Image: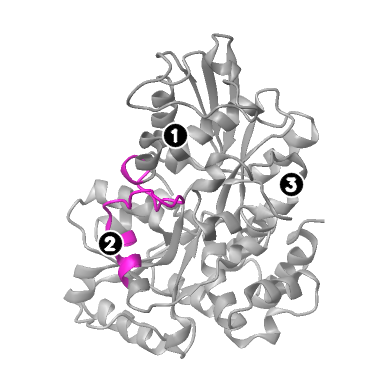
Amino acid sequence: MVKKWLSASVALVLTTALLAACGSKNGGEASPSASGEASPGGSGAPVTIKMFTASPEYTEAFHAYIKEYKKVKPNVTIDLEIMQSDYPTVLKSRIASGNTPDVFQTTAGGEIQQYAEYSADLTNEPLAAAMTDAVKANMSYDGKVLGLPVKGNLFTLIYNKKLFADAGITEVPKTTAQLQDAVAKLEAKGITPFTNAYKEWWVQKHILQHFIDAEAGGNAADLVAQFQQGKTTFKDHPTMMKYFDFVDYTVEHGTAKPLESDLNKEISDFATGKAAIMTGQGAWVEDSIRKIDPNIEIGIMGYPVDDNPDHSFIITGADQALRINKDSKVARETIDFFNWLYTSEYGKNWFANVAKVIPPIKDGAMPDLQMPKAMDEYLTSGGTSGDLAINYSLDSFHQKLGEIMQAYIGKNKTKDQAIDEIQKAWIQLGAAK
């Protein structure tokens, strides 16, 4: 997920003092407060906003908009802390201790509900009006907009077009049989088919959701709820059982030591041509890949989950949310900051030109990247977008899923043990209590 990668065990703390003059022509003006009066942040009184996120891939992009906001609010300081390893646990600990950050990050969907009592209602703010309808739905609970998206997103298998062509693969595989044929052709040319970042727990949720969607037939939310309620298990669903087969297959035909491979390594292996297909990733990796090889030709493809080509689709939507602490002493100033990001001319272009992500707002520019363009072409030509199934479970479950699968890949758990433990985790951790 990164531009400047951090070790998964390191928290990056960036403190940026905002120094420049208010009302810059470049940055635009911050939104007024809810009462229509100017926010105290512009009066000269010192204001500090504590921001805690789990997206190290956007370190430079976050830093850029904080710097730009100097030109709008000269007396506001933003303390930006970024942590990837064990973020859900640390966040819960801080909230429980009464040390809730002014801004914190969660996943969308189920965690919108879980953290509703701590989240400011953004329904009537300009930033909510700027969101696309689909994204706004991902950020809402009980009729209220309680989060703001970090980005729009795209989840697919990613492949190197040149390596596919070199191997004589003329059609992107959509079934398991076609995938096996493509893998055989790649290996016949001495090309490693897969690169995996199985050291990262979160890649498993990105993979599993494709199998959930294929099994659910358009009712992913209902199927996930059945798992959370203990009404069903993997063994009741043949397509979901193939999730384990897929992971096994990528390990067997992938780069060495997958449990030692983090996201940084996976990006490097793909960008340098050491492997033809990236698993568990999406649109967020393209900028980093192209920094290594600006000329690489990247393709996207759905996961071939079974022998039905209609089950191979990409997944789009907003899966990450920033939340504003409703009890923060600087809640109004914090809301003003994000209203500015979502509505100013700088902000409208920040998503595409700085963060280089799919914009979650209606009039945001699309980044000049291959994967978002391929997504547009895929969807406009009648391609099917799957449901963002990861939104229906909490990240506490997803982290446990990743840890269980790491033990399974390392042969410390059998498939049956992994299935039983995943089922228990879904019941205990899957939904807001």
Tell me the distance, in whole angstroms, between the alpha carbons under discs 3 and 1. Answer: 24 Å
Lower position in the chain sequence, tag 2 or tag 1: 1
Amino acid on which the number 2 mark rests in the picture: Lys
Lower position in the chain sequence, tag 2 or tag 3: 3
Q: How is the image coloured?
A: one colour
Residue visible at 73% across and 79% down in the picture: 233
Residue 62's disc is 1
- Marks 2 and 1 close (CB-CB < 8 Å): no
The 10 Å Cα crowd at callout 1, few under 14, some 14 to 19, many 20 or more, is: some
The 10 Å Cα crowd at callout 2, few under 14, some 14 to 19, many 20 or more, is: some
Residue 274's disc is 2
Answer above or below: position of 320 versus 93. below
Amino acid on which the number 3 mark rests in the picture: Ala
Quarter of the figure with residue 333: top right
Q: Secondary structure at mark 2?
A: loop
Amino acid on which the number 1 mark rests in the picture: Phe
Total numbered labels = 3
Tell me the distance, in whole angstroms, between the alpha carbons under discs 2 and 3. Answer: 44 Å
Residue 108's disc is none
Tell me the distance, in whole angstroms, between the alpha carbons under discs 2 and 1. Answer: 31 Å
Residue 355 picture location, percent across and down: 38, 42
**Foreground: 102 or 15?**
102
**Would you say 111 lies left or right of 46 here?**
right
The residue that disc 3 covers is: 116
Residue 153 picture location, percent across and down: 45, 57
**Would you say 6 lies left or right of 393 here?**
left
Answer above or below: position of 119 versus 45. below
Residue visible at 69% across and 84% down in the picture: 235
Residue visible at 59% across and 67% down in the picture: 389
Residue visible at 27% across and 59% down in the picture: 370
Answer above or below: position of 392 versus 353. below
